[in-house]
Image (spheres, rainbow, N blue to C red):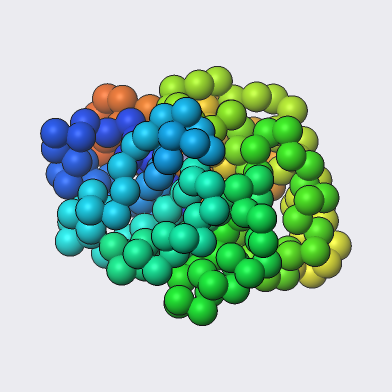
Amino acid sequence: MRMILAPSILAADFARLGEAVGQAASAGAEYIHIDVMDGMFVPSISFGMPAIKGIRPCTDKVFDVHMMVEEPGRYAEAMKEAGADLLCVHQEACRHLDRTLSQIRDLGMKAGVALNPSTPVSALDCILEKVDMVLIMTVNPGFGGQKLIPYTLEKVRQLRRRLDSLGLDKDIEVDGGVTLGNASQVLAAGANILVAGSAVFGGDITENAQAFLRKFEEFSR
Ligand code: DX5
Ligand code: ZN
């Protein structure tokens, strides 16, 4: 499976956000991970459509928008207009998840579903065929810079096994506490898209992103 690095701009310097996005993209990141927080589903508030629209001209890479928002379907159309390519909603935040996923796909975006650490993988059994990507949260959402919770990797393994047994070739993204030190372990569990916030933007962006890409190469050898 294709391995993709998705730097999370939550950890970037907001005073020079466009430049940071451009640097991550030039270094080889295929996705730009954009964390939208509403202050309800998670305690923090991050940014919304105007900020996303503002950085859209900086790159043509995939804008992977992670909606940590209650009833995110309310914003699907506006997110599409702002430049989202992939919209990922939380299973826990959607009363009518099936409908929200259809809405995202009808708008021409890829649809992702995210699971909090305590939500079992089986919660997605009925809708696996309808999603392009599952995001397994490896920390409790809301803040960057936390430590990966080890039991969440077992969920990644379970999900990859489940997808394989159904003959489904879907992306598994992991988000939270991913570092150069645990990247191989995360890939070995079955994830193929790695979100990294502080591990990319905390320091030299180009060097950090390229180090992740080298890990991907090592892993596929
Ligand atoms: C957490 C966010 C993450 C976060 C990751 O709620 O969804 O995307 O920015 O940051 P790090 O990689 O620093 O844990
Ligand atoms: Zn995220």
Which residue is at a point 68% across and 33% down the rendered structure image? 117
Is the residue 126 above or below the residue 156 in the image? Answer: below
What residue lies at 67% left-to-right and 61% top-to-bottom?
96
* Residue 174 pos. (x, y %): 58, 42
Residue 143 showing in the rendered view: yes
Q: How many marks?
A: 0
Residue 69 shown left or right of residue 31 in the figure = right
Residue 10 locus on image (x, y percent): 34, 35
Q: Is residue 113 left or right of residue 23?
A: right
In the image, residue 82 lies at what x, y percent? 29, 63
> Is 36 drawn above or below residue 201 in the view shown?
below
Quarter the N terminus occupies: bottom right
Residue 167 x/y as whole percent: 79, 69
Figure check: 148 above or below 28 = above
Q: Could you tell me which residue is drawn at 45 percent across and 77 percent down?
A: 108
Q: Quadrant of residue 152?
A: top right
Residue at (53%, 47%) from the top-left corner? 70
Regarding residue 219, the answer to whether it shows in the image is no
20 or 188, which is in the foreground?
Answer: 20
Name the residue nearer the viewer: 47 or 7.
47
Q: Is residue 211 left or right of residue 162?
A: left
Residue most extreme to the right:
165
Q: Nearer the viewer, residue 183 or 128?
A: 128
